[in-house]
Amino acid sequence: MARAVNVSDIIDTRPVGPFQLRAFLLCAAVLFVDGFDVQGITYVVPTITREWGLVRGQLWPALTAGLVGVMLGAMLLAPLADRVGRRRVIVYSCVAFGTLTLLTLAADSLPSLVALRFLTGLGLGSALPNALGLASEYAPHKRRALVVMFVGSGISLGAIAAGIVATQLVTPFGWRAMFVVGGVLPLVLAVLLAGGLPESLRFAALIASRRAETKRLLRRLAPDLGDDVEIVSHHAHAGTATVIDSRAVLVPGVVTGGVVAGRGVDSRVGVDASWAANLPQLPGGSAGCRRARKGRACLGSRRHANAPHFSPAHRTRRAPSATLGARATR
């Protein structure tokens, strides 16, 4: 019988190893190039203003467009990681804002510069929160705040580096030299990320088709575990499968946030969840919602009328992970 392995426990109870350090450094590098590109344009504003014959302060739309793009990218594009994974979003974002930064070399008017800075900001905004999130997921609980501060400092270091590069390149080579450096760096980094950045372990643990990748990542974290393991994740918020409350409708056979739905135990209230396998057809799709067809748990703030009601007398202490694991490996 396979052993049950809790993803969160593996990360939280073991010391930080080379595999995690590499992930932290790569995430910090993402924020470094992010900070470089965000701040770099501010150092070339006087040069662009003189070359294009603008008045002082007339470039404010280009500066604002970049920051608006960062905001919208973080709000609208970064959440795509919950569907395709953090690694893929980070790599594609670096390719996107690196390419768009290089395209800024062709800008010859204020409107074109505004448009390019806005599009570049979308890529910058989508990379930033995912890099921080990925680093925090691989950090043990006791070191998480320190790791996030370390990775987050990449933004400030990138802004400082942009100022140093500007003093060395803008005068002899012109303002476009800043965008050459700002475009090449993320593209080179994207190659390194594609080969060395790991996927979120908790995200991969929730996707049935990625269990092989999950075990491979787990072996990098804990080589002594071997291959005969069954993956369980207690953190529903670290992937696409989320259960709103302890009485939400569950999809049979899906591991969601510590619940082995349809055959296991809800670890938060310690009640038997085997009733989920026999739930009747619910409006909107099989086993509770249309999203269930894609292998995700049904989300909702209200409990369906056919789901059983658990009175306080049925609630027990939190079920230990060993009990959950034993259910998962049957």
Image: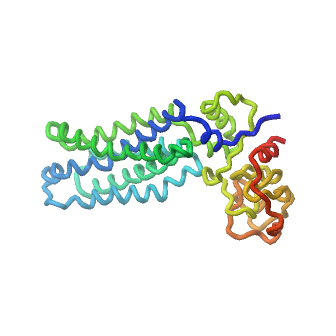
Give percent across and percent down for residue 7: 66, 42
Question: What residue is shown at x 43% (from left), y 59% (from top)?
Answer: 72
Q: In this rendering, would 280 be left or right of 195?
A: right
Visual colour scheme: rainbow
Whether residue 95 appears in this view of the structure is no
Q: Residue at x 60, y 36 (%)?
A: 14
- Whether residue 159 sits left or right of residue 123 in the image: it is left
Q: Is residue 293 left or right of residue 161?
A: right
Image quadrant where one finds the C terminus? top right
Q: At which x and y percent is residue 31?
A: 40, 44
Identity of the residue drawn at 23% across and 43% down: 163
Give above or below for 113 relative to 138. below
Q: Is residue 299 left or right of residue 190?
A: right
Residue 153 screen position, x and y as percent: 38, 45
Name the foreground residue: 159 vs 48.
Answer: 159
Q: Is residue 281 visible?
A: yes
In front of the other: 55 or 5: 5
Residue 37 higher or lower than 16, as above or below: below
- Residue 1: image location, x then y, percent: 83, 34
